[in-house]
Image (cartoon, rainbow, N blue to C red):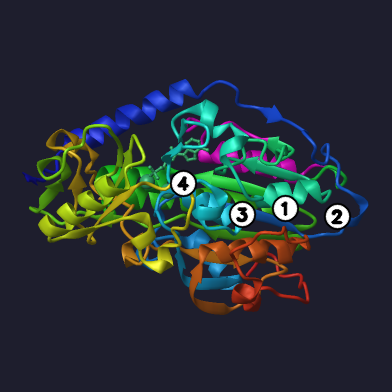
Amino acid sequence: MRIIQFSLRSALFAATLFVFSGVCLAQNETNDSYTHGTGGINAANQLSKPYLVLISIDGFRWDYLDRYPTPNMHRIAAVGTKAERLLPVFPTLTFPNHYSIATGLYPDHHGLVANDFPDPERDTWYSLKKRDTVEDRRFYAGEPIWVTAETQGMVAASFFFVGTEAPVKGVYPTHWRSYNKKITGEDRVDQVLTWLAKPEQNRPHIYTLYFEDVDDYSHWFGPGSEENIEAISRVDGYIGRLLDGLEKLSFADQVNIILLSDHGQGAYLQDQQAYVLADHVNLDDTAIIEGGSYLFLHLDRDEPDRAAKIVATVNDSWNHGHAYLPEDTPSQWHVGSNQRFPDVILMPDAGYAVLSKEGKAGKINAGDHGWAPENPAMHGFFIACGPNITPGLSLGPVNNIDVYPLMLSILGLDAPDLMDGNATHLATAFNTTRSTQSCSKQ
Ligand code: AMP
Ligand code: ZN
Ligand code: ZN
Protein backbone atom coordinates (compact mmCIF):
# COMPACT_ATOMS: atom_id res chain seq x y z
CA MET A 1 0.00 0.00 0.00
CA ARG A 2 1.21 3.49 -0.76
CA ILE A 3 0.01 6.95 0.11
CA ILE A 4 -0.35 9.00 -3.05
CA GLN A 5 1.73 12.13 -3.04
CA PHE A 6 0.74 14.77 -5.52
CA SER A 7 3.86 16.57 -6.53
CA LEU A 8 5.08 18.75 -9.31
CA ARG A 9 7.33 15.86 -10.34
CA SER A 10 4.74 14.11 -12.50
CA ALA A 11 3.76 17.41 -14.13
CA LEU A 12 7.40 18.10 -14.99
CA PHE A 13 7.89 14.57 -16.28
CA ALA A 14 4.82 14.89 -18.47
CA ALA A 15 6.01 18.26 -19.76
CA THR A 16 9.36 16.70 -20.70
CA LEU A 17 7.59 13.91 -22.57
CA PHE A 18 5.49 16.54 -24.32
CA VAL A 19 8.53 18.34 -25.68
CA PHE A 20 10.33 15.09 -26.52
CA SER A 21 7.45 13.58 -28.48
CA GLY A 22 7.08 16.80 -30.43
CA VAL A 23 10.72 16.67 -31.47
CA CYS A 24 10.47 13.00 -32.47
CA LEU A 25 7.43 13.53 -34.65
CA ALA A 26 8.48 16.77 -36.29
CA GLN A 27 9.29 15.08 -39.59
CA ASN A 28 6.95 13.84 -42.30
CA GLU A 29 4.39 16.54 -41.79
CA THR A 30 2.74 16.55 -45.17
CA ASN A 31 1.06 13.64 -46.87
CA ASP A 32 -1.21 13.53 -49.85
CA SER A 33 -1.94 9.89 -50.56
CA TYR A 34 -4.54 8.55 -52.88
CA THR A 35 -4.35 4.80 -52.29
CA HIS A 36 -7.57 3.34 -53.75
CA GLY A 37 -9.51 6.48 -52.75
CA THR A 38 -10.93 9.33 -54.81
CA GLY A 39 -7.61 10.45 -56.20
CA GLY A 40 -8.52 13.84 -54.79
CA ILE A 41 -11.49 14.36 -57.12
CA ASN A 42 -15.12 14.25 -56.00
CA ALA A 43 -17.41 11.96 -57.97
CA ALA A 44 -20.19 13.86 -59.77
CA ASN A 45 -22.85 12.61 -57.36
CA GLN A 46 -20.92 14.01 -54.37
CA LEU A 47 -20.49 17.56 -55.61
CA SER A 48 -23.82 18.85 -54.33
CA LYS A 49 -23.41 17.27 -50.89
CA PRO A 50 -22.90 19.44 -47.79
CA TYR A 51 -19.62 19.73 -45.88
CA LEU A 52 -18.82 18.38 -42.42
CA VAL A 53 -15.99 19.29 -40.03
CA LEU A 54 -15.58 16.76 -37.21
CA ILE A 55 -13.58 18.29 -34.36
CA SER A 56 -12.35 16.47 -31.27
CA ILE A 57 -11.13 18.26 -28.16
CA ASP A 58 -9.36 15.53 -26.23
CA GLY A 59 -10.43 15.20 -22.59
CA PHE A 60 -13.03 17.98 -22.67
CA ARG A 61 -15.46 16.96 -19.91
CA TRP A 62 -19.20 17.39 -20.50
CA ASP A 63 -19.63 20.09 -17.84
CA TYR A 64 -16.73 22.37 -18.93
CA LEU A 65 -18.99 24.19 -21.39
CA ASP A 66 -21.10 25.60 -18.58
CA ARG A 67 -18.29 26.01 -16.07
CA TYR A 68 -15.62 27.83 -18.03
CA PRO A 69 -15.64 30.65 -20.58
CA THR A 70 -16.16 29.09 -24.02
CA PRO A 71 -17.83 31.82 -26.09
CA ASN A 72 -17.06 30.27 -29.46
CA MET A 73 -18.30 26.82 -28.54
CA HIS A 74 -21.42 28.53 -27.28
CA ARG A 75 -21.82 30.14 -30.71
CA ILE A 76 -22.15 26.60 -32.09
CA ALA A 77 -24.49 25.40 -29.35
CA ALA A 78 -26.69 28.48 -29.80
CA VAL A 79 -27.48 27.68 -33.43
CA GLY A 80 -27.45 23.91 -33.26
CA THR A 81 -27.96 20.77 -31.21
CA LYS A 82 -26.39 20.14 -27.83
CA ALA A 83 -26.34 16.84 -25.97
CA GLU A 84 -26.23 16.80 -22.19
CA ARG A 85 -23.10 14.63 -22.51
CA LEU A 86 -21.36 12.17 -24.81
CA LEU A 87 -20.94 8.71 -23.33
CA PRO A 88 -17.56 7.11 -23.98
CA VAL A 89 -16.86 3.45 -24.63
CA PHE A 90 -14.74 1.21 -22.45
CA PRO A 91 -11.88 1.78 -21.89
CA THR A 92 -12.16 5.56 -21.45
CA LEU A 93 -8.89 6.20 -23.28
CA THR A 94 -8.06 8.29 -26.31
CA PHE A 95 -7.47 5.72 -29.04
CA PRO A 96 -10.44 3.39 -28.44
CA ASN A 97 -12.85 6.32 -28.15
CA HIS A 98 -11.68 8.30 -31.15
CA TYR A 99 -11.85 5.22 -33.30
CA SER A 100 -15.34 4.39 -32.01
CA ILE A 101 -16.45 7.90 -32.96
CA ALA A 102 -14.87 7.47 -36.40
CA THR A 103 -16.32 4.00 -37.09
CA GLY A 104 -19.52 3.66 -35.03
CA LEU A 105 -18.11 0.44 -33.57
CA TYR A 106 -17.25 -0.75 -30.09
CA PRO A 107 -13.54 -1.49 -29.54
CA ASP A 108 -14.40 -5.20 -29.52
CA HIS A 109 -15.25 -4.80 -33.22
CA HIS A 110 -12.85 -2.07 -34.38
CA GLY A 111 -9.83 -3.58 -32.65
CA LEU A 112 -8.31 -0.59 -30.82
CA VAL A 113 -9.11 -1.99 -27.38
CA ALA A 114 -6.68 0.36 -25.56
CA ASN A 115 -3.88 2.82 -26.31
CA ASP A 116 -1.46 -0.11 -25.95
CA PHE A 117 -2.45 -3.72 -26.51
CA PRO A 118 -1.12 -7.01 -27.85
CA ASP A 119 -2.26 -8.59 -31.08
CA PRO A 120 -2.02 -12.31 -30.24
CA GLU A 121 -2.72 -13.26 -33.86
CA ARG A 122 0.53 -11.67 -34.98
CA ASP A 123 2.43 -11.90 -31.70
CA THR A 124 3.05 -8.18 -31.67
CA TRP A 125 1.99 -5.06 -29.75
CA TYR A 126 0.26 -1.84 -30.74
CA SER A 127 1.20 1.39 -29.02
CA LEU A 128 0.13 4.98 -29.62
CA LYS A 129 3.77 5.85 -29.00
CA LYS A 130 5.07 3.59 -31.78
CA ARG A 131 4.66 5.32 -35.13
CA ASP A 132 5.08 2.10 -37.14
CA THR A 133 2.12 0.52 -35.33
CA VAL A 134 -0.05 3.65 -35.49
CA GLU A 135 0.52 3.60 -39.26
CA ASP A 136 -0.03 -0.17 -39.63
CA ARG A 137 -3.46 -0.85 -41.14
CA ARG A 138 -3.50 -4.41 -39.78
CA PHE A 139 -4.41 -3.11 -36.32
CA TYR A 140 -7.51 -1.26 -37.55
CA ALA A 141 -10.81 -2.99 -38.31
CA GLY A 142 -14.07 -1.29 -39.27
CA GLU A 143 -14.55 1.57 -41.66
CA PRO A 144 -13.79 5.09 -40.43
CA ILE A 145 -15.90 7.88 -41.91
CA TRP A 146 -13.11 9.19 -44.15
CA VAL A 147 -12.70 5.72 -45.69
CA THR A 148 -16.48 5.45 -46.18
CA ALA A 149 -16.34 8.83 -47.92
CA GLU A 150 -13.30 8.14 -50.11
CA THR A 151 -14.59 4.74 -51.26
CA GLN A 152 -17.90 6.33 -52.28
CA GLY A 153 -16.22 9.07 -54.29
CA MET A 154 -16.13 11.84 -51.69
CA VAL A 155 -12.84 13.60 -50.94
CA ALA A 156 -11.76 13.56 -47.25
CA ALA A 157 -9.13 15.56 -45.35
CA SER A 158 -7.74 15.22 -41.87
CA PHE A 159 -5.65 17.41 -39.64
CA PHE A 160 -5.20 14.60 -37.15
CA PHE A 161 -7.60 11.95 -35.92
CA VAL A 162 -6.84 8.48 -34.62
CA GLY A 163 -6.79 6.10 -37.59
CA THR A 164 -6.11 8.64 -40.33
CA GLU A 165 -2.41 7.79 -40.51
CA ALA A 166 -3.00 4.20 -41.60
CA PRO A 167 -4.50 3.09 -44.92
CA VAL A 168 -7.49 1.37 -43.33
CA LYS A 169 -8.98 -1.00 -45.94
CA GLY A 170 -6.18 0.33 -48.17
CA VAL A 171 -7.56 3.89 -48.10
CA TYR A 172 -6.20 7.13 -46.65
CA PRO A 173 -8.04 10.41 -46.56
CA THR A 174 -6.86 12.36 -49.62
CA HIS A 175 -5.12 14.84 -47.29
CA TRP A 176 -3.71 13.81 -43.93
CA ARG A 177 -0.95 14.65 -41.51
CA SER A 178 1.32 12.57 -39.29
CA TYR A 179 0.50 13.40 -35.71
CA ASN A 180 2.80 16.14 -34.40
CA LYS A 181 2.04 18.00 -31.20
CA LYS A 182 4.24 20.90 -32.25
CA ILE A 183 1.85 22.06 -34.96
CA THR A 184 -0.15 24.87 -33.43
CA GLY A 185 -3.92 24.89 -33.21
CA GLU A 186 -3.98 27.98 -35.44
CA ASP A 187 -2.02 26.17 -38.15
CA ARG A 188 -4.33 23.18 -37.98
CA VAL A 189 -7.40 25.40 -38.39
CA ASP A 190 -5.80 27.43 -41.17
CA GLN A 191 -4.99 24.28 -43.13
CA VAL A 192 -8.61 23.16 -42.91
CA LEU A 193 -9.68 26.59 -44.17
CA THR A 194 -7.18 26.26 -47.02
CA TRP A 195 -8.64 22.89 -47.97
CA LEU A 196 -12.12 24.41 -47.82
CA ALA A 197 -11.01 27.05 -50.31
CA LYS A 198 -10.14 24.44 -52.95
CA PRO A 199 -12.11 24.34 -56.20
CA GLU A 200 -15.36 22.42 -55.86
CA GLN A 201 -14.11 19.40 -57.73
CA ASN A 202 -11.26 18.83 -55.28
CA ARG A 203 -12.79 20.34 -52.16
CA PRO A 204 -13.05 17.76 -49.40
CA HIS A 205 -16.55 17.26 -47.95
CA ILE A 206 -15.43 15.65 -44.69
CA TYR A 207 -12.68 17.13 -42.49
CA THR A 208 -11.30 16.11 -39.12
CA LEU A 209 -9.51 18.29 -36.59
CA TYR A 210 -8.01 17.30 -33.25
CA PHE A 211 -6.73 19.32 -30.28
CA GLU A 212 -4.89 17.70 -27.35
CA ASP A 213 -4.27 20.74 -25.11
CA VAL A 214 -7.20 20.31 -22.75
CA ASP A 215 -6.35 16.67 -22.05
CA ASP A 216 -2.66 17.46 -21.54
CA TYR A 217 -3.19 20.30 -19.12
CA SER A 218 -5.85 18.51 -17.13
CA HIS A 219 -3.52 15.49 -16.74
CA TRP A 220 -0.67 17.71 -15.59
CA PHE A 221 -2.52 20.20 -13.40
CA GLY A 222 -5.94 18.65 -12.80
CA PRO A 223 -9.42 19.33 -14.10
CA GLY A 224 -10.53 22.76 -12.95
CA SER A 225 -6.95 24.01 -12.52
CA GLU A 226 -6.04 27.44 -13.84
CA GLU A 227 -3.83 25.83 -16.47
CA ASN A 228 -6.65 23.60 -17.63
CA ILE A 229 -9.06 26.53 -17.86
CA GLU A 230 -6.47 28.43 -19.91
CA ALA A 231 -6.16 25.45 -22.27
CA ILE A 232 -9.95 25.37 -22.63
CA SER A 233 -9.92 29.05 -23.51
CA ARG A 234 -7.08 28.55 -26.00
CA VAL A 235 -8.93 25.76 -27.79
CA ASP A 236 -12.13 27.80 -27.75
CA GLY A 237 -10.08 30.43 -29.60
CA TYR A 238 -9.18 27.86 -32.29
CA ILE A 239 -12.88 27.15 -32.73
CA GLY A 240 -13.51 30.89 -33.04
CA ARG A 241 -10.80 31.13 -35.69
CA LEU A 242 -12.49 28.36 -37.65
CA LEU A 243 -15.94 29.98 -37.35
CA ASP A 244 -14.57 33.34 -38.47
CA GLY A 245 -12.87 31.67 -41.43
CA LEU A 246 -16.05 29.81 -42.37
CA GLU A 247 -18.04 33.03 -42.31
CA LYS A 248 -15.95 34.34 -45.21
CA LEU A 249 -16.79 31.38 -47.45
CA SER A 250 -19.47 31.83 -50.10
CA PHE A 251 -20.87 28.44 -49.10
CA ALA A 252 -20.68 28.92 -45.31
CA ASP A 253 -24.32 27.87 -45.02
CA GLN A 254 -23.38 24.45 -46.41
CA VAL A 255 -20.84 23.60 -43.70
CA ASN A 256 -21.79 21.45 -40.71
CA ILE A 257 -19.67 21.14 -37.60
CA ILE A 258 -19.67 18.32 -35.05
CA LEU A 259 -17.64 19.27 -31.98
CA LEU A 260 -17.07 16.60 -29.36
CA SER A 261 -14.60 14.91 -27.04
CA ASP A 262 -13.40 11.35 -26.55
CA HIS A 263 -13.84 11.30 -22.75
CA GLY A 264 -13.78 13.55 -19.70
CA GLN A 265 -11.26 13.90 -16.91
CA GLY A 266 -11.39 13.20 -13.17
CA ALA A 267 -9.25 13.85 -10.12
CA TYR A 268 -7.80 11.35 -7.66
CA LEU A 269 -9.06 11.46 -4.11
CA GLN A 270 -6.45 12.98 -1.84
CA ASP A 271 -4.66 11.00 0.91
CA GLN A 272 -5.83 7.65 -0.32
CA GLN A 273 -3.99 4.37 -0.34
CA ALA A 274 -3.39 3.17 -3.89
CA TYR A 275 -3.99 -0.55 -4.32
CA VAL A 276 -0.61 -2.07 -5.20
CA LEU A 277 -1.12 -5.28 -7.16
CA ALA A 278 2.37 -6.72 -6.58
CA ASP A 279 1.70 -6.74 -2.83
CA HIS A 280 -0.94 -9.41 -3.45
CA VAL A 281 -0.13 -11.17 -6.71
CA ASN A 282 3.01 -12.60 -8.33
CA LEU A 283 3.43 -10.62 -11.54
CA ASP A 284 6.15 -12.72 -13.18
CA ASP A 285 5.49 -13.48 -16.86
CA THR A 286 2.88 -10.79 -17.30
CA ALA A 287 2.68 -7.58 -19.30
CA ILE A 288 1.03 -4.65 -17.59
CA ILE A 289 -0.62 -1.60 -19.11
CA GLU A 290 -1.60 0.85 -16.41
CA GLY A 291 -2.60 4.44 -15.90
CA GLY A 292 -3.37 4.81 -12.19
CA SER A 293 -7.06 4.93 -13.06
CA TYR A 294 -7.01 1.44 -14.63
CA LEU A 295 -4.71 -1.55 -14.88
CA PHE A 296 -4.70 -4.16 -17.65
CA LEU A 297 -2.89 -7.41 -17.10
CA HIS A 298 -1.86 -9.61 -20.02
CA LEU A 299 -0.52 -13.05 -19.20
CA ASP A 300 2.43 -14.19 -21.26
CA ARG A 301 0.90 -17.62 -21.75
CA ASP A 302 -2.66 -18.88 -21.99
CA GLU A 303 -3.35 -19.67 -18.33
CA PRO A 304 -7.07 -19.39 -17.57
CA ASP A 305 -6.73 -20.69 -14.01
CA ARG A 306 -4.11 -18.10 -13.23
CA ALA A 307 -6.31 -15.23 -14.40
CA ALA A 308 -9.24 -16.47 -12.31
CA LYS A 309 -7.01 -16.83 -9.24
CA ILE A 310 -5.67 -13.30 -9.66
CA VAL A 311 -9.21 -11.95 -9.93
CA ALA A 312 -10.24 -13.78 -6.74
CA THR A 313 -7.17 -12.61 -4.83
CA VAL A 314 -7.66 -8.98 -5.84
CA ASN A 315 -11.35 -8.98 -5.04
CA ASP A 316 -10.63 -10.43 -1.60
CA SER A 317 -8.13 -7.72 -0.80
CA TRP A 318 -9.36 -4.53 -2.52
CA ASN A 319 -11.99 -2.28 -0.96
CA HIS A 320 -11.97 0.46 -3.60
CA GLY A 321 -12.05 -1.33 -6.90
CA HIS A 322 -12.73 -4.56 -8.68
CA ALA A 323 -10.92 -7.10 -10.83
CA TYR A 324 -12.64 -8.76 -13.77
CA LEU A 325 -12.08 -11.50 -16.27
CA PRO A 326 -13.06 -10.02 -19.65
CA GLU A 327 -16.13 -12.27 -19.83
CA ASP A 328 -17.37 -11.02 -16.44
CA THR A 329 -17.15 -7.29 -17.11
CA PRO A 330 -20.37 -5.23 -16.97
CA SER A 331 -22.39 -5.75 -20.16
CA GLN A 332 -22.41 -2.00 -20.93
CA TRP A 333 -18.63 -2.14 -21.38
CA HIS A 334 -19.16 -4.32 -24.46
CA VAL A 335 -16.03 -6.34 -23.84
CA GLY A 336 -16.62 -9.18 -26.25
CA SER A 337 -14.41 -11.93 -27.54
CA ASN A 338 -11.64 -9.81 -29.05
CA GLN A 339 -8.39 -11.50 -28.01
CA ARG A 340 -6.64 -8.14 -27.69
CA PHE A 341 -8.51 -7.38 -24.46
CA PRO A 342 -6.51 -8.03 -21.27
CA ASP A 343 -6.74 -11.31 -19.35
CA VAL A 344 -7.49 -9.39 -16.16
CA ILE A 345 -8.95 -5.88 -15.87
CA LEU A 346 -8.51 -3.91 -12.64
CA MET A 347 -10.92 -1.00 -12.31
CA PRO A 348 -10.66 1.31 -9.28
CA ASP A 349 -13.76 3.07 -7.99
CA ALA A 350 -14.09 6.70 -9.12
CA GLY A 351 -11.17 8.75 -7.79
CA TYR A 352 -9.25 5.74 -6.48
CA ALA A 353 -5.92 4.50 -7.77
CA VAL A 354 -4.28 1.20 -8.66
CA LEU A 355 -0.59 0.55 -9.28
CA SER A 356 1.26 -2.60 -10.33
CA LYS A 357 4.03 -1.75 -7.87
CA GLU A 358 5.05 1.17 -5.70
CA GLY A 359 7.63 2.32 -8.22
CA LYS A 360 4.83 3.17 -10.64
CA ALA A 361 3.46 6.02 -8.51
CA GLY A 362 4.43 8.44 -11.32
CA LYS A 363 1.48 7.04 -13.28
CA ILE A 364 -0.78 9.03 -11.00
CA ASN A 365 -1.32 12.43 -12.57
CA ALA A 366 -3.19 15.42 -11.19
CA GLY A 367 -6.06 14.48 -13.48
CA ASP A 368 -6.92 11.30 -15.32
CA HIS A 369 -9.34 9.20 -17.30
CA GLY A 370 -9.54 5.47 -17.69
CA TRP A 371 -12.06 4.92 -14.91
CA ALA A 372 -15.26 3.08 -15.83
CA PRO A 373 -17.34 4.69 -18.59
CA GLU A 374 -20.37 5.06 -16.32
CA ASN A 375 -18.41 7.44 -14.05
CA PRO A 376 -19.76 10.97 -14.87
CA ALA A 377 -16.27 12.49 -14.80
CA MET A 378 -15.42 10.28 -17.79
CA HIS A 379 -18.22 11.72 -19.93
CA GLY A 380 -17.44 13.92 -22.91
CA PHE A 381 -19.48 16.54 -24.76
CA PHE A 382 -21.28 16.85 -28.07
CA ILE A 383 -22.51 19.92 -29.93
CA ALA A 384 -23.25 20.32 -33.63
CA CYS A 385 -24.47 22.98 -36.04
CA GLY A 386 -25.06 23.65 -39.71
CA PRO A 387 -27.59 23.12 -42.46
CA ASN A 388 -28.18 19.46 -41.64
CA ILE A 389 -28.41 19.92 -37.89
CA THR A 390 -31.60 20.69 -36.00
CA PRO A 391 -31.34 24.18 -34.49
CA GLY A 392 -32.20 24.78 -30.85
CA LEU A 393 -32.32 21.10 -29.87
CA SER A 394 -31.22 19.81 -26.47
CA LEU A 395 -30.66 16.09 -26.15
CA GLY A 396 -30.00 13.86 -23.17
CA PRO A 397 -26.90 11.65 -23.02
CA VAL A 398 -25.69 10.39 -26.41
CA ASN A 399 -23.50 7.33 -27.08
CA ASN A 400 -20.39 8.14 -29.06
CA ILE A 401 -20.90 5.14 -31.37
CA ASP A 402 -24.07 6.88 -32.63
CA VAL A 403 -22.12 9.83 -34.07
CA TYR A 404 -20.95 7.80 -37.08
CA PRO A 405 -24.48 7.09 -38.39
CA LEU A 406 -25.31 10.81 -37.96
CA MET A 407 -22.26 11.66 -40.09
CA LEU A 408 -23.46 9.20 -42.75
CA SER A 409 -26.86 10.95 -42.80
CA ILE A 410 -25.30 14.40 -43.09
CA LEU A 411 -23.03 13.35 -45.95
CA GLY A 412 -25.59 11.10 -47.65
CA LEU A 413 -23.24 8.11 -47.59
CA ASP A 414 -24.18 4.42 -47.60
CA ALA A 415 -23.60 2.52 -44.37
CA PRO A 416 -20.98 -0.22 -44.23
CA ASP A 417 -22.00 -3.78 -43.32
CA LEU A 418 -20.93 -3.55 -39.70
CA MET A 419 -22.11 -0.75 -37.41
CA ASP A 420 -22.83 -0.83 -33.66
CA GLY A 421 -24.22 2.71 -33.66
CA ASN A 422 -27.87 3.26 -34.45
CA ALA A 423 -29.05 6.05 -36.78
CA THR A 424 -32.36 6.38 -34.95
CA HIS A 425 -30.64 7.48 -31.71
CA LEU A 426 -29.50 10.82 -33.13
CA ALA A 427 -32.24 11.09 -35.75
CA THR A 428 -33.78 14.17 -34.13
CA ALA A 429 -30.46 16.01 -34.47
CA PHE A 430 -30.48 15.42 -38.23
CA ASN A 431 -32.29 18.13 -40.13
CA THR A 432 -33.69 16.28 -43.13
CA THR A 433 -34.79 19.48 -44.85
CA ARG A 434 -31.23 20.88 -45.16
CA SER A 435 -31.63 24.51 -44.14
CA THR A 436 -29.27 27.39 -44.84
CA GLN A 437 -28.36 27.78 -41.18
CA SER A 438 -24.70 28.73 -41.01
CA CYS A 439 -22.64 27.72 -37.97
CA SER A 440 -21.00 31.12 -37.90
CA LYS A 441 -24.15 33.28 -37.93
CA GLN A 442 -26.57 33.66 -35.03
P1 AMP B 1 -4.28 9.36 -23.32
O1 AMP B 1 -4.55 10.58 -22.53
O2 AMP B 1 -3.17 8.56 -22.75
O3 AMP B 1 -5.48 8.52 -23.60
O4 AMP B 1 -3.75 9.85 -24.75
C1 AMP B 1 -3.80 11.19 -25.15
C2 AMP B 1 -2.64 11.48 -26.05
O5 AMP B 1 -2.75 10.77 -27.27
C3 AMP B 1 -2.59 12.93 -26.48
O6 AMP B 1 -1.90 13.73 -25.54
C4 AMP B 1 -1.84 12.87 -27.77
O7 AMP B 1 -0.50 13.23 -27.58
C5 AMP B 1 -1.88 11.41 -28.17
N1 AMP B 1 -2.37 11.26 -29.54
C6 AMP B 1 -3.53 11.71 -30.04
N2 AMP B 1 -3.64 11.40 -31.35
C7 AMP B 1 -2.51 10.76 -31.68
C8 AMP B 1 -2.02 10.19 -32.90
N3 AMP B 1 -2.72 10.24 -34.01
N4 AMP B 1 -0.80 9.59 -32.85
C9 AMP B 1 -0.09 9.53 -31.71
N5 AMP B 1 -0.50 10.05 -30.55
C10 AMP B 1 -1.69 10.66 -30.54
ZN1 ZN C 1 -8.23 11.42 -24.82
ZN1 ZN D 1 -5.53 11.77 -21.55
Residue at numbered disc 1: 248
Residue at numbered disc 2: 46
Alpha-carbon span between mark 3 and mark 4 = 20 Å
Q: What secondary structure is marked by label 4?
A: loop
Instruction: Check disc 2 and give the amino acid type.
Output: Gln
Q: Is residue 292 above or below residue 287?
A: below
Q: Which mark is residue 339?
A: 4
Q: Position of residue 435 (x, y in %)?
A: 76, 73
Q: Is residue 36 visible?
A: yes
The C terminus appears in which quarter of the rendering?
bottom right
Other-residue count near label 3 (Cα within 10 Å), few / some / many at <14 / 14–19 / ≥20: many
Q: Which mark is residue 103?
A: 3
Q: Is residue 266 above or below residue 122?
A: below
Does the CB distance between marks 3 and 4 fall below 8 Å?
Answer: no
Labels 4, 2: front one: 4
Q: Earlier in the sequence, mark 3 or mark 4?
A: 3
